Image (spheres, rainbow, N blue to C red):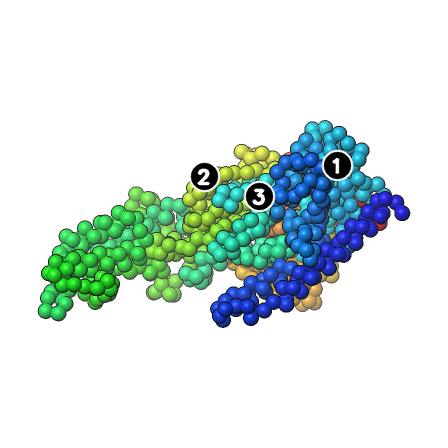
Amino acid sequence: MPADVSELAREREFLAEARSQLGRMRDRVAALDGSYAGNWVSAEVLAATLARRMEQLTDDPEIPLFFGRIDLAAEPGAEIGAAAPGETFHIGRRHVSDPDGEPMVVDWRAPVSTPFYRATPKEPMGITARRRYGFARGHLTAFEDESLNRDDRAAAGAGLAGAGPSADAADGTAAHSEILEAEIERPRTGPMRDIVATIQPEQDVIVRMPLERTLVVQGAPGTGKTAVGLHRAAYLLYAHRDQLTRRGVLVVGPNKSFLRYIRDVLPALGEIHATQATIEEIVSSHAPVRATEPADVATLKGDGRMAAVLLRAVWSHIVTPQDTLVLPRGSFRWRVPAYEAREAIEQIRARDVRYALGGAQLRHALAHRVLVQIEETGDALDDKAWDVLARTKPVRDYAAAVWPAVEPRRLLFRLFSDQRFLAECAEGILSDAEQLLLGWDRPPRTPGSARWTTADLVLLDEIADLLDRTESVAHIVVDEAQDLSAMMLRSLGRRAATGSLTVLGDLAQATTPWASSDWADVLGHLAKPEGHVEQLTAGFRVPADVIDLAARLLPAIAPGLQPPTAVRRARGRLRITTTPLDDVLVAVPDLEGSVGLIVPDAAVPHVRTTLAAVGLMFAVVGEQDDDRPGPGGATGPDDGTGTDDGMDLEDASEFDAHLDLVPASLAKGLEFDHVVLHDPAAIVAAEPNRATGLRRLYVCLTRAVTSLVVRHDDDLPPELGIDRLADKPAEARSVRGPVRSGDSADPEPLGRHPSSRPRRA
């Protein structure tokens, strides 16, 4: 038997044994019960802990138990943990040990695993070889060995039938891997999957940065910024388990469809302790969203200056004491003069406490002054007397009169209904025109009947924090952060006041009227000015010709950003055509992987009729809920129930279908093997201004992993410079000749991509 075949057989035996040991670990946990607990509370906690552990040890036979291996040097090398020289370690999604406790599979987050992601021949980090495995539905089919010994390249092991990585670069960087490339390009259907087997060195550095550091990851399309953020959350949950489990991890996405798209990533990595939510869900406890509003109003409500207006509005309720506090007690009447009450208020305000806490402190301050007078008469009081005096009706009534309670909805209702009150609070902060814009033309009768918007809820959240401190979590991962308003960012920042954040985004993809144009401003609104900005510019997913086309928009939408660099320079397919949509879609059933049909929001009803007419099964992204972003709120896509012939997937979730119909406003953050982009001019025109429209188009152009068809009737936006492609062939090297409107960069309507794969058994 050839050596490489026997080696593959040994690896398969090892995989089978590792799966057996994982089952043993799960059985051992299942055998435990709550009888060891000392009381029912401990029993409940233990039962919940065991249930979580059982879930973490679940083995999915279609998910590889390990994806790599490292061989340590015979002599001590770099610091890589407590491993001994000469050992080998299989790297996987979770730790698996044998009955003696010896590791069979090492968690990818363990320190010993770091060289698998970062080692190069120039910096081997104490390992001599790196092995990558190829799997098909959980079955081990191939492997590649890469030598990290610069003096012995020829000794690098070969995969099956000689398959192995190509020669290392001259500068000592890691070798090209066909298995790695095939995994990156592997067609997919369903929600986003983890990238734990394909994390690149620059991504791994970000993933493993310390918990206390707040990071901004500026990432061009296809650079993996979302996956990096989620893997960072998984890493931090591993490295700081107790702290993060106790205080919480929050993952914030732009909409519910996006959260459904990423929902399986952390559980696949064995982490079930993170909460996922949108901004609207985070602030939804204050009131339900019942309306949307014009973009200019929502933009003003999201302006950071509103924080100063609300601060002034809250503290304006304090009244300067004019009367004496009189507290009867037995036959005595104890008095606190108005000037002493004023002194107490000044002292409390100087402490910069929350408003509600200040009211409680005022009651105790007044009670303390009475207590001092009583003690001066020689009357001895016990330790509880102070609290008793603070709770007496005269003290409570006096404090409530000069430091009245504030309720967030009532305050915001008054601010928008009472133009005089708004003018007092906004003087020197907002202009007269801005104040008129904020005020309600027809105020509702009560706060309960007000039709609040998402922007209003964010303001209510700010008021609530001025009253009582918002609880902080240990870490927040927020994606598409460039689209958040200053007030939304403040809402997240206070939830990480004693924690840290991983901020993900791309300034070139900013599509809201209130979007940020500078990461320094974002960090300032988050109250984390010390945060560090990391840039990811290497695009591992989006093909080169697609990236090059989209990058033509950057001078108009983000002139200060560095254009992304596509790693896959010869893999993409780009076609620009005026062929009717139903003809373009004929090839969809034969495509391998997921297909996204991205259309202007207003075109969704018409296009779904077209899809039904050609007999295609599909799902509509965002149709499960009112998920489409509007100015200041959320409005759902067309609320029709589908075509009469039932060709759309009424019972299927988006991303579970082979074909997804995607409103352009919901395309951000999603990824498909094949994309048909319909009517780009209408996508641009649908936005409030051209710059925002071009950014929306940039997002839509960069959703494809394998092929992109741009289908149009009207002229394409001139910023794309389609008629200038002939002058720059190097920028579109996969395009055969000049591409102009109506021409095809590929002879087929939509082609199946023959991805490169390692040789198999």
* Observer-nearest of 96 and 142: 96
The residue to which callout 2 is attached is 530
Dot in front, 1 or 3: 1
Q: Secondary structure at mark 1?
A: strand
Q: Secondary structure at mark 3?
A: loop
Q: Nearer the viewer, residue 444 or 457?
A: 457
Residue 69 appears anywhere in the view: yes
Q: Nearer the viewer, mark 3 or mark 2?
A: 3
Image coordinates of residue 360 in percent, x first then y, are: 27, 59
Choose between 596 and 328: the one closer to the eye: 328
* Residue hosting label 3: 208
Residue beneath disc 1: 147
Label annotation for residue 304: none
Q: Is residue 410 left or right of residue 149?
A: left
Amino acid type at image mark 3: Arg
In this image, 510 relative to 296: left or right? right
Give the CA distance from mark 1 to mark 3.
25 Å
Whichever of labels 1 and 3 marks the residue nearer the N terminus, that label is: 1
Q: Are marks 1 and 3 in contact (CB under 8 Å)?
A: no
Q: Residue furthest top?
A: 170
Q: In the picture provided, is 250 more to the left or to the right than 752? A: left
Q: Tell me the amino acid under the disc marked 2.
A: Glu
Q: Where is residue 27, by image quadrant? A: bottom right
Residue at left 35%, top 53%?
466
Tell me what residue is drawn at x 69 percent, y 40 percent: 85
Labels 2 and 1: the sequence-earlier one = 1
At 20% from the left edge and 58% from the top edge, which residue is drawn? 368
Q: Amino acid at mark 1?
A: Ser
Task: Report the mark closest to the observer, 2 or 1.
Answer: 1
